[in-house]
Image (cartoon, rainbow, N blue to C red):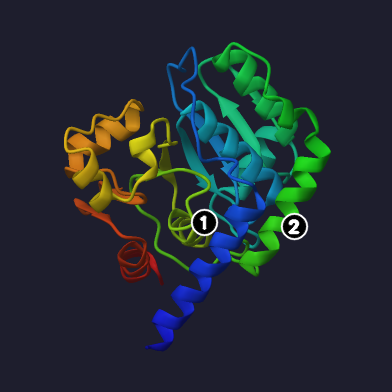
Amino acid sequence: MSAWSLGYNLSLAGSMVTTMMRAGLGTAAVEAEARPEWLFELYEFEGCPYCRIVREALTELDLDATIYPCPKGGERFRPRVVERGGKAQFPYFVDPSTGASMYESGDIVAYLYETYGKRRPPFYWQWMELQQLGSGLAGAARLGAGVRARPSRAPERPLELYSFEASPFARPVRELLCELELPYVLRSCGRRTAADWLPPPARRSLYPDYRPEGVNRRALLARAGQVTIPYLVDPNTGVEMGESADILDYLAATYGA
């Protein structure tokens, strides 16, 4: 086994630990009652426990956002947060459809559920301090991945990533996107039916007429012929691909300095 393969497998194992410690939050979805006219803007960094909570809520509501990665030491989007919000605190959320903008993960989760879910947040979000503590503990298994910026070449247009927060395979991809400060549209693909929980080979065998309910899963099926998470679309190069390890190789080779 090569050093790269060993490192990737260890990273994947740590990602699975994080998913288990979050007890499946950011996996299942119940579609929001309303959808925004314009994409949310989320300034965050992958290793931040407070940002993780917001991404979990986005998955649960099947809502998308343009992610502007703001890792520590990053200079691409962090100054924009200070200019717009007054301080370098994360997450920072902007809803162009309503003009709302805010810090604080608890406020953002409540806003998403009340404004677009048309309901109160589920009971487990009522104890936000405990969720923040749990998110911090779960993130320890990532050993600092998705926290600090590394040199990169900026894309002309944001990339696009089909993902759901709890996916252990999508997490390393989001971490690298963050470290390279590559903006991307996060297409939430939370699981909604029994077939959604199966890996693609088993799904093709057991559900040959699979028709997902989620809007992004339907779009991905039409686009790629199957639903595989993560799935990257790069409008700058025309490249589209699944498989976490392949995406990591591509991002490093294409945008790494």
Instruction: Write the residue at 20% across / 45% down.
Output: 204
Q: Position of residue 134 (x, y in %)?
A: 75, 49
**Image quadrant occupied by the N terminus:** bottom left
Instruction: Write the residue at 39% across / 80% down.
Output: 5
Is 102 placed left or right of 10 in the picture? right
Q: What SS does tag 1 mark? A: helix
Circle 2: residue type: Leu
Is 128 placed left or right of 36 in the picture? right
Structural distance between the alpha carbons of marks 2 and 1: 20 Å
* Residue 235 disc label: none
Residue 188 drawn above or below residue 36: below
Residue 40 drawn above or below residue 257: above
User: Which residue in the protein does label 2 denote?
Assistant: 137
Circle 1: residue type: Cys
Q: Is residue 42 visible?
A: yes
Instruction: Write the residue at 75% across / 41% down.
Output: 131
Q: Nearer the viewer, residue 247 or 138?
A: 138
Q: What SS does tag 2 mark? A: helix
Q: How many marks?
A: 2
User: Which residue in the protein does label 1 denote?
Assistant: 178
Between label 2 and label 1, give the one nearer the viewer: 2
**Image quadrant occupied by the C terminus:** bottom left
Precedes in sequence: disc 2 or disc 1: 2
Q: Position of residue 27 (x, y in %)?
A: 51, 40
Q: Classify 10 Å Cα crowding around label 1: few (below 14), some (14-19), many (20 and above).
A: many
Q: Position of residue 203 (x, y in %)?
A: 26, 44
Instruction: Write the residue at 45% across / 82% down.
Output: 6
